Image (cartoon, helix red, strand yellow):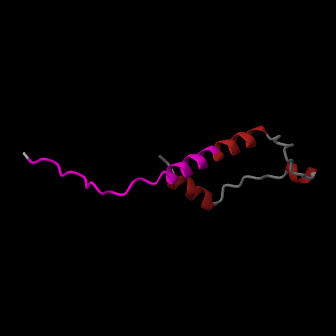
Amino acid sequence: MKTPPEPPRNSPPRNPLQRRDILKTLGLGAAGAAAAAVLPAGDEAHAMESPQEQVKARYRETEHVKRFYALNRL
């Protein structure tokens, strides 16, 4: 049975700044998400429609719509 090779003894030390940068980025991202959750959302936007637009037919089953439904059946 072979023994696993030993790691080189003169390996360069790990750079602790990389780990700190990752942790700093995660912390800033969490703080930003918490701040965004606290901000007020504002009012909802409503589309302005005339009475004629409210009554008109909106859905039309054209040939490309029928083809889409036919191709996407399970």
Region of the chain picked out in magenta, as a range = 2-27
Q: Residue furthest front?
A: 10
Give the residue drawn at x 65%, y 47%.
Answer: 28
Across and down, in percent, residue 23 comes to: 56, 46
Closer to the camera in the image, 10 or 34: 10
Vertical comparison of 34 with 55: above or below: above
| Magenta span contains residue 22 | yes
Closer to the camera in the image, 23 or 55: 23
Across and down, in percent, residue 55 comes to: 86, 49
Give the residue drawn at x 46%, y 54%.
Answer: 15
Across and down, in percent, residue 26 comes to: 59, 46
Give the residue drawn at x 36%, y 57%.
Answer: 12
Tell me where residue 68 sits by quadrant. bottom right
Q: Residue furthest bottom?
A: 64
Q: Is residue 27 left or right of residue 2?
A: right
Across and down, in percent, residue 19 comes to: 50, 49
| Magenta span contains residue 26 | yes
Q: Is residue 57 left or right of residue 71?
A: right
Tag count: 0
Closer to the camera in the image, 20 or 65: 20
- Location of the N terminus (image quadrant): top left
Give the residue drawn at x 62%, y 57%.
Answer: 65
